[in-house]
Amino acid sequence: MVKRTMSKCVILISGGMDSVTLLHYAINTLKVDEVYALSFNYGQKHSRELEEASWNCEKFPEVKEHRVLDLGFMKEILKNSSSLVGDAIEVPELESIAEKDLDQPITYVPNRNMMLLSLAASYAESCGCRQVFYGAQAQDEYGYWDCTEAFLDNINNVLSLNRRDSVTIKAPFVHKSKADVVTIGIVNGVDFSRTWTCYRGGEKPCKVCPSCVERELAFSKAGQKDPLIR
């Protein structure tokens, strides 16, 4: 039987600044000593982020395993509903998104977090972990219902139905701003040059997509310089 302990966890790591900061925070601040990291290739245009996920996981002996799951089928079934997957819809500039669409912009991937967290909960149970961490933070709440406290509470209500080894989803940054995440990352030794945020996934950040604009604003509010912007 797999030994259960609260000193081990599964962490979803995309390679973006929030999840990379979460990895450092879990190990350096929360003192989790056994991490099973999980990344997903779901056909995202910014798949470059997966390289950064791997680089950061390799830094820590506490990361016992880093798996990258191929969910390429999502690109095919969701290509007409999200600009982040497939080629049918271009990633917009933030300023071009109408105010009425900000509550669920075209950069939203339908039910992505529910799918990824369900897989992570299964993986956690098989690894003997009782907790899964993901990097939802307060700024995402405006347009992504699956990054909210209400979503977190409800998915945990479902997972609590497990009759033996229930898994809890945790989002330590759910009440933190993106600027707060930058500050937490600096305290925990994150090399932000080894994170990737741009939704367009080019050689350099585009500076105009929603993710790039939010990242630049976060660094500015934290009084820091983004090392990806030269």
Image: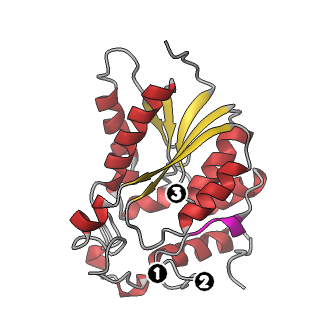
Q: Is residue 116 toward the left or the right of residue 62 in the image?
A: left
- Specify the quadrant of the image occupied by residue 89: bottom left
Which mark is nearer the camera, 3 or 1?
Answer: 3
- Label annotation for residue 97: none
Residue at point 31%, 15% (across, down):
163
The residue beneath circle 3 is: 14
The residue beneath circle 2 is: 204
Q: Is residue 180 visible?
A: no
Q: Is residue 99 toward the left or the right of residue 45 in the image?
A: left
Q: Give the structural element (helix, strand or loop) at label 1.
A: loop
Q: Is residue 193 visible?
A: yes
Q: Give the structural element (helix, strand or loop) at label 3.
A: loop
Q: Earlier in the sequence, mark 2 or mark 3?
A: 3
Q: Earlier in the sequence, mark 3 or mark 1?
A: 3
Amino acid carrying label 1: it is Cys
Amino acid carrying label 2: it is Lys
The residue beneath circle 1 is: 209
Amino acid carrying label 3: it is Ser
